[in-house]
Amino acid sequence: MSQQVAPTHSLTAVTPILSSQTQRYLGYLAAATTVLIWSCYFLSLRQGALSPLGTFDLTLFRFGVPGLILLPLFIKRWHTLRRVNPVWLLGMAVGAGLPFFLLSAVGMRWAPVAHGSTLIPGTAPVFVTAMAVLVFAQPLSGWRRFGLVAVVAGVVCLLWTGLSGASQGLGQGQGLFLVCSFLWAVFTLSVRQSGLSPLEAASVVTVPSTVLLTLYAVAAQPALTLAAVPTGEWVVQLLVQGLAVGLGAGFLYGFAIRQLGAEITSAIGSLTPVCATVLAWVFLRESIELSTALGLSLVTLGVICASGLIHPEKK
Protein backbone atom coordinates (compact mmCIF):
# COMPACT_ATOMS: atom_id res chain seq x y z
CA MET A 1 0.00 0.00 0.00
CA SER A 2 1.01 3.59 -0.57
CA GLN A 3 1.88 5.36 2.60
CA GLN A 4 2.83 8.97 3.10
CA VAL A 5 4.14 9.98 6.47
CA ALA A 6 2.28 12.86 8.07
CA PRO A 7 4.09 16.16 7.59
CA THR A 8 6.31 17.27 10.41
CA HIS A 9 6.39 20.72 11.98
CA SER A 10 9.70 21.51 10.26
CA LEU A 11 9.20 23.27 6.94
CA THR A 12 12.36 21.78 5.46
CA ALA A 13 11.77 18.18 6.55
CA VAL A 14 11.16 15.90 3.54
CA THR A 15 8.86 13.01 4.39
CA PRO A 16 9.49 9.73 2.51
CA ILE A 17 7.07 8.28 -0.03
CA LEU A 18 6.35 4.57 0.20
CA SER A 19 4.54 3.30 -2.92
CA SER A 20 4.11 -0.16 -4.35
CA GLN A 21 5.17 -0.85 -7.92
CA THR A 22 1.54 -0.89 -9.03
CA GLN A 23 0.85 2.45 -7.40
CA ARG A 24 3.92 3.95 -9.05
CA TYR A 25 2.64 2.76 -12.42
CA LEU A 26 -0.70 4.38 -11.62
CA GLY A 27 1.21 7.53 -10.71
CA TYR A 28 2.91 7.55 -14.12
CA LEU A 29 -0.45 7.02 -15.80
CA ALA A 30 -1.99 9.86 -13.80
CA ALA A 31 0.88 12.19 -14.72
CA ALA A 32 0.64 11.27 -18.42
CA THR A 33 -3.11 11.91 -18.41
CA THR A 34 -2.45 15.25 -16.74
CA VAL A 35 -0.13 16.16 -19.62
CA LEU A 36 -2.93 15.55 -22.12
CA ILE A 37 -5.39 17.61 -20.08
CA TRP A 38 -2.86 20.43 -19.69
CA SER A 39 -2.31 20.48 -23.44
CA CYS A 40 -6.04 20.94 -23.98
CA TYR A 41 -6.01 23.58 -21.24
CA PHE A 42 -3.40 25.67 -23.04
CA LEU A 43 -5.34 25.44 -26.27
CA SER A 44 -8.54 26.36 -24.46
CA LEU A 45 -6.90 29.32 -22.74
CA ARG A 46 -5.40 30.53 -26.00
CA GLN A 47 -8.72 30.16 -27.80
CA GLY A 48 -10.41 32.08 -25.00
CA ALA A 49 -7.85 34.87 -25.30
CA LEU A 50 -8.60 35.13 -29.03
CA SER A 51 -12.39 35.10 -28.60
CA PRO A 52 -14.85 37.61 -27.10
CA LEU A 53 -15.07 35.46 -23.95
CA GLY A 54 -13.79 37.63 -21.10
CA THR A 55 -11.11 36.77 -18.59
CA PHE A 56 -13.64 36.94 -15.75
CA ASP A 57 -15.83 34.37 -17.49
CA LEU A 58 -12.86 32.05 -17.97
CA THR A 59 -11.85 32.50 -14.34
CA LEU A 60 -15.36 31.63 -13.19
CA PHE A 61 -15.25 28.46 -15.26
CA ARG A 62 -11.82 27.52 -13.96
CA PHE A 63 -12.51 27.95 -10.24
CA GLY A 64 -16.25 28.39 -9.75
CA VAL A 65 -17.30 24.99 -11.07
CA PRO A 66 -14.77 22.85 -9.17
CA GLY A 67 -14.99 25.18 -6.17
CA LEU A 68 -18.71 24.58 -5.77
CA ILE A 69 -18.30 20.83 -6.30
CA LEU A 70 -15.49 20.59 -3.73
CA LEU A 71 -17.05 22.95 -1.18
CA PRO A 72 -18.71 20.13 0.82
CA LEU A 73 -15.38 18.29 1.00
CA PHE A 74 -13.60 21.49 2.03
CA ILE A 75 -16.05 22.00 4.89
CA LYS A 76 -15.97 18.34 5.93
CA ARG A 77 -12.15 18.21 6.01
CA TRP A 78 -11.71 21.66 7.55
CA HIS A 79 -10.13 20.28 10.73
CA THR A 80 -7.63 18.30 8.64
CA LEU A 81 -6.79 21.34 6.53
CA ARG A 82 -6.25 23.49 9.61
CA ARG A 83 -3.51 21.14 10.80
CA VAL A 84 -1.45 21.79 7.66
CA ASN A 85 1.25 24.43 7.96
CA PRO A 86 -0.16 27.75 6.63
CA VAL A 87 2.90 28.13 4.40
CA TRP A 88 1.86 25.09 2.35
CA LEU A 89 -1.78 26.14 2.26
CA LEU A 90 -0.78 29.56 0.96
CA GLY A 91 1.62 27.97 -1.52
CA MET A 92 -1.19 25.85 -2.96
CA ALA A 93 -3.77 28.65 -3.05
CA VAL A 94 -1.41 31.13 -4.71
CA GLY A 95 0.67 28.75 -6.80
CA ALA A 96 -2.27 27.24 -8.69
CA GLY A 97 -5.03 29.69 -7.81
CA LEU A 98 -6.10 33.09 -9.08
CA PRO A 99 -2.62 34.66 -9.41
CA PHE A 100 -1.36 31.76 -11.51
CA PHE A 101 -4.42 31.65 -13.75
CA LEU A 102 -4.72 35.38 -14.36
CA LEU A 103 -1.03 35.82 -15.13
CA SER A 104 -1.09 32.92 -17.58
CA ALA A 105 -4.24 34.29 -19.23
CA VAL A 106 -2.59 37.67 -19.77
CA GLY A 107 0.57 36.02 -21.05
CA MET A 108 -1.45 34.04 -23.60
CA ARG A 109 -2.60 37.31 -25.16
CA TRP A 110 1.00 38.22 -25.96
CA ALA A 111 2.71 34.92 -26.68
CA PRO A 112 1.79 31.72 -28.56
CA VAL A 113 0.80 28.39 -27.04
CA ALA A 114 4.18 26.89 -27.93
CA HIS A 115 5.90 29.35 -25.58
CA GLY A 116 3.37 29.14 -22.75
CA SER A 117 3.13 25.38 -22.79
CA THR A 118 6.93 25.11 -22.80
CA LEU A 119 7.90 27.75 -20.28
CA ILE A 120 5.24 27.06 -17.64
CA PRO A 121 5.35 23.26 -17.23
CA GLY A 122 8.76 23.02 -18.90
CA THR A 123 10.74 25.18 -16.49
CA ALA A 124 8.71 24.41 -13.35
CA PRO A 125 10.84 21.29 -12.65
CA VAL A 126 13.92 23.51 -12.68
CA PHE A 127 12.39 25.70 -10.00
CA VAL A 128 11.32 22.57 -8.10
CA THR A 129 14.86 21.17 -8.24
CA ALA A 130 16.40 24.50 -7.28
CA MET A 131 14.15 24.81 -4.23
CA ALA A 132 14.75 21.17 -3.34
CA VAL A 133 18.50 21.83 -3.28
CA LEU A 134 18.50 25.29 -1.70
CA VAL A 135 15.61 24.95 0.76
CA PHE A 136 15.37 21.22 1.48
CA ALA A 137 19.11 20.45 1.16
CA GLN A 138 18.55 17.70 -1.41
CA PRO A 139 21.60 16.49 -3.40
CA LEU A 140 22.15 17.69 -6.98
CA SER A 141 23.36 14.85 -9.20
CA GLY A 142 25.32 15.09 -12.42
CA TRP A 143 22.22 14.32 -14.46
CA ARG A 144 20.40 17.22 -12.82
CA ARG A 145 23.29 19.60 -13.47
CA PHE A 146 23.26 18.62 -17.14
CA GLY A 147 19.49 19.05 -17.24
CA LEU A 148 19.63 22.53 -15.75
CA VAL A 149 22.15 23.64 -18.37
CA ALA A 150 19.96 22.25 -21.16
CA VAL A 151 16.88 23.98 -19.76
CA VAL A 152 18.65 27.34 -19.51
CA ALA A 153 19.80 26.96 -23.13
CA GLY A 154 16.27 26.07 -24.21
CA VAL A 155 14.76 29.03 -22.39
CA VAL A 156 17.25 31.36 -24.10
CA CYS A 157 16.15 29.97 -27.47
CA LEU A 158 12.50 30.54 -26.62
CA LEU A 159 13.09 34.04 -25.25
CA TRP A 160 15.38 35.12 -28.09
CA THR A 161 12.63 36.40 -30.37
CA GLY A 162 11.00 38.40 -27.60
CA LEU A 163 14.27 39.83 -26.29
CA SER A 164 15.38 40.86 -29.78
CA GLY A 165 12.27 43.03 -30.13
CA ALA A 166 11.01 41.24 -33.23
CA SER A 167 7.55 40.82 -31.78
CA GLN A 168 5.90 43.48 -29.65
CA GLY A 169 4.70 42.15 -26.30
CA LEU A 170 6.17 38.68 -26.79
CA GLY A 171 8.95 39.22 -24.27
CA GLN A 172 6.45 40.40 -21.64
CA GLY A 173 4.32 37.33 -22.23
CA GLN A 174 7.32 35.05 -21.84
CA GLY A 175 8.26 36.81 -18.61
CA LEU A 176 4.79 36.19 -17.22
CA PHE A 177 5.08 32.53 -18.18
CA LEU A 178 8.28 32.23 -16.14
CA VAL A 179 6.55 33.80 -13.13
CA CYS A 180 3.72 31.29 -13.57
CA SER A 181 6.28 28.49 -13.76
CA PHE A 182 7.74 29.53 -10.42
CA LEU A 183 4.26 29.71 -8.87
CA TRP A 184 3.48 26.22 -10.16
CA ALA A 185 6.70 24.90 -8.65
CA VAL A 186 5.68 26.40 -5.31
CA PHE A 187 2.30 24.69 -5.65
CA THR A 188 3.91 21.34 -6.51
CA LEU A 189 6.21 21.38 -3.49
CA SER A 190 3.42 22.62 -1.24
CA VAL A 191 1.20 19.69 -2.23
CA ARG A 192 4.10 17.31 -1.62
CA GLN A 193 4.89 18.73 1.81
CA SER A 194 1.29 19.18 2.97
CA GLY A 195 0.47 15.47 2.93
CA LEU A 196 -3.08 16.24 1.79
CA SER A 197 -5.05 13.94 -0.48
CA PRO A 198 -5.45 15.01 -4.13
CA LEU A 199 -9.02 16.22 -3.67
CA GLU A 200 -8.17 18.03 -0.44
CA ALA A 201 -5.36 19.85 -2.22
CA ALA A 202 -7.68 20.72 -5.12
CA SER A 203 -10.22 22.14 -2.69
CA VAL A 204 -7.56 24.37 -1.11
CA VAL A 205 -6.95 25.86 -4.56
CA THR A 206 -10.50 26.20 -5.87
CA VAL A 207 -12.70 27.03 -2.87
CA PRO A 208 -10.79 30.15 -1.67
CA SER A 209 -10.51 31.31 -5.29
CA THR A 210 -14.27 30.92 -5.70
CA VAL A 211 -14.88 32.95 -2.55
CA LEU A 212 -12.61 35.74 -3.81
CA LEU A 213 -14.32 35.72 -7.20
CA THR A 214 -17.72 35.95 -5.52
CA LEU A 215 -16.63 38.93 -3.42
CA TYR A 216 -15.19 40.62 -6.51
CA ALA A 217 -18.38 39.99 -8.48
CA VAL A 218 -20.51 41.52 -5.71
CA ALA A 219 -18.25 44.55 -5.29
CA ALA A 220 -17.31 45.33 -8.90
CA GLN A 221 -20.22 43.72 -10.76
CA PRO A 222 -18.14 42.90 -13.85
CA ALA A 223 -19.99 42.37 -17.10
CA LEU A 224 -20.25 38.81 -18.37
CA THR A 225 -19.59 38.17 -22.05
CA LEU A 226 -21.32 34.81 -22.41
CA ALA A 227 -24.15 36.33 -24.44
CA ALA A 228 -21.67 37.50 -27.10
CA VAL A 229 -20.09 34.06 -27.48
CA PRO A 230 -21.64 31.09 -29.30
CA THR A 231 -23.02 28.52 -26.87
CA GLY A 232 -20.84 25.75 -28.22
CA GLU A 233 -17.69 27.79 -27.62
CA TRP A 234 -18.32 28.66 -23.98
CA VAL A 235 -19.57 25.15 -23.20
CA VAL A 236 -16.23 23.78 -24.40
CA GLN A 237 -14.44 26.31 -22.20
CA LEU A 238 -16.61 25.29 -19.26
CA LEU A 239 -15.84 21.61 -19.72
CA VAL A 240 -12.11 22.11 -20.23
CA GLN A 241 -11.47 24.82 -17.64
CA GLY A 242 -13.86 23.71 -14.92
CA LEU A 243 -14.13 19.94 -15.11
CA ALA A 244 -11.06 18.70 -16.99
CA VAL A 245 -8.47 21.06 -15.51
CA GLY A 246 -10.09 22.15 -12.26
CA LEU A 247 -11.17 18.70 -11.12
CA GLY A 248 -9.54 16.13 -13.40
CA ALA A 249 -5.99 17.46 -13.68
CA GLY A 250 -6.07 18.74 -10.11
CA PHE A 251 -6.83 15.28 -8.77
CA LEU A 252 -4.48 13.41 -11.13
CA TYR A 253 -1.52 15.72 -10.54
CA GLY A 254 -1.95 15.49 -6.79
CA PHE A 255 -2.22 11.71 -7.01
CA ALA A 256 0.96 11.51 -9.09
CA ILE A 257 2.84 13.64 -6.56
CA ARG A 258 1.82 11.30 -3.74
CA GLN A 259 3.03 8.24 -5.67
CA LEU A 260 6.12 9.60 -7.47
CA GLY A 261 7.23 12.72 -5.63
CA ALA A 262 7.35 16.34 -6.72
CA GLU A 263 10.42 16.25 -8.96
CA ILE A 264 9.52 13.22 -11.09
CA THR A 265 5.90 14.37 -11.45
CA SER A 266 6.92 17.85 -12.55
CA ALA A 267 9.41 16.32 -14.99
CA ILE A 268 6.69 14.31 -16.69
CA GLY A 269 4.80 17.57 -17.00
CA SER A 270 7.59 18.79 -19.28
CA LEU A 271 6.13 16.57 -22.00
CA THR A 272 3.25 19.05 -22.24
CA PRO A 273 5.08 21.29 -24.76
CA VAL A 274 5.33 18.52 -27.33
CA CYS A 275 1.66 17.62 -27.09
CA ALA A 276 0.36 21.20 -26.89
CA THR A 277 2.52 22.51 -29.71
CA VAL A 278 1.39 19.77 -32.08
CA LEU A 279 -2.25 20.40 -31.16
CA ALA A 280 -1.80 24.16 -31.62
CA TRP A 281 -0.23 23.59 -35.03
CA VAL A 282 -3.13 21.36 -36.07
CA PHE A 283 -6.09 23.25 -34.60
CA LEU A 284 -4.91 26.87 -34.21
CA ARG A 285 -2.60 26.97 -37.25
CA GLU A 286 0.23 28.41 -35.17
CA SER A 287 3.63 28.38 -36.83
CA ILE A 288 6.69 26.89 -35.14
CA GLU A 289 9.93 28.77 -35.73
CA LEU A 290 13.31 27.07 -35.67
CA SER A 291 14.31 28.73 -32.39
CA THR A 292 11.01 27.64 -30.83
CA ALA A 293 11.49 24.04 -31.95
CA LEU A 294 15.06 24.00 -30.67
CA GLY A 295 14.08 25.58 -27.37
CA LEU A 296 11.20 23.16 -26.93
CA SER A 297 13.50 20.19 -27.49
CA LEU A 298 16.19 21.45 -25.12
CA VAL A 299 13.74 22.32 -22.35
CA THR A 300 12.01 18.95 -22.59
CA LEU A 301 15.29 17.04 -22.53
CA GLY A 302 16.67 19.23 -19.77
CA VAL A 303 13.79 18.92 -17.35
CA ILE A 304 13.71 15.15 -17.78
CA CYS A 305 17.38 14.99 -16.78
CA ALA A 306 17.14 17.66 -14.09
CA SER A 307 14.21 15.98 -12.38
CA GLY A 308 15.68 12.49 -12.21
CA LEU A 309 13.65 10.54 -14.76
CA ILE A 310 16.77 9.14 -16.43
CA HIS A 311 18.35 8.24 -13.09
CA PRO A 312 15.32 8.22 -10.77
CA GLU A 313 15.67 8.95 -7.11
CA LYS A 314 12.80 8.78 -4.67
CA LYS A 315 12.01 12.01 -2.87
Image (cartoon, rainbow, N blue to C red):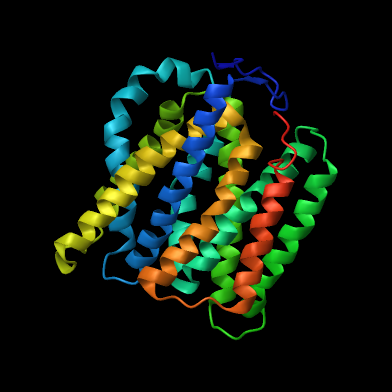
Tell me if 307 is positioned left or right of 96 in this view: right
Residue 203's x, y, as percent?
39, 32
Screen quadrant of the C terminus: top right
Screen quadrant of the N terminus: top right
Q: Is residue 107 above or below residue 205?
A: below
Image quadrant of residue 180? bottom right
Residue 191's x, y, as percent?
55, 32
Residue depicted at 21% across the width and 64% down the height:
225
Question: Which of 63/240 is in front?
Answer: 240
Number of marks drawn: 0
Q: Is residue 86 visible?
A: no
Image quadrant of residue 139? top right
Q: Is residue 92 visible?
A: yes
Tell me if 135 is positioned left or right of 100 in this view: right
Residue depicted at 62% across the width and 31% down the height:
261
Residue 229's x, y, as percent?
19, 67
Question: Which of 27/222 is in front?
Answer: 27
Q: Is residue 251 above or below residue 214?
A: above
Q: Is residue 216 above or below residue 178?
A: above
Residue depicted at 61% across the width and 27% down the height:
193
Residue 248's x, y, as percent?
37, 39
Question: Which of 146/96 is in front?
Answer: 146
Image quadrant of residue 74? top left
Tell me if 168 is positioned left or right of 108 in this view: right
Name of the residue lying farthest toward the bottom: 166
Name of the residue lying farthest toward the right: 142
Question: Which of 226/90 is in front?
Answer: 226
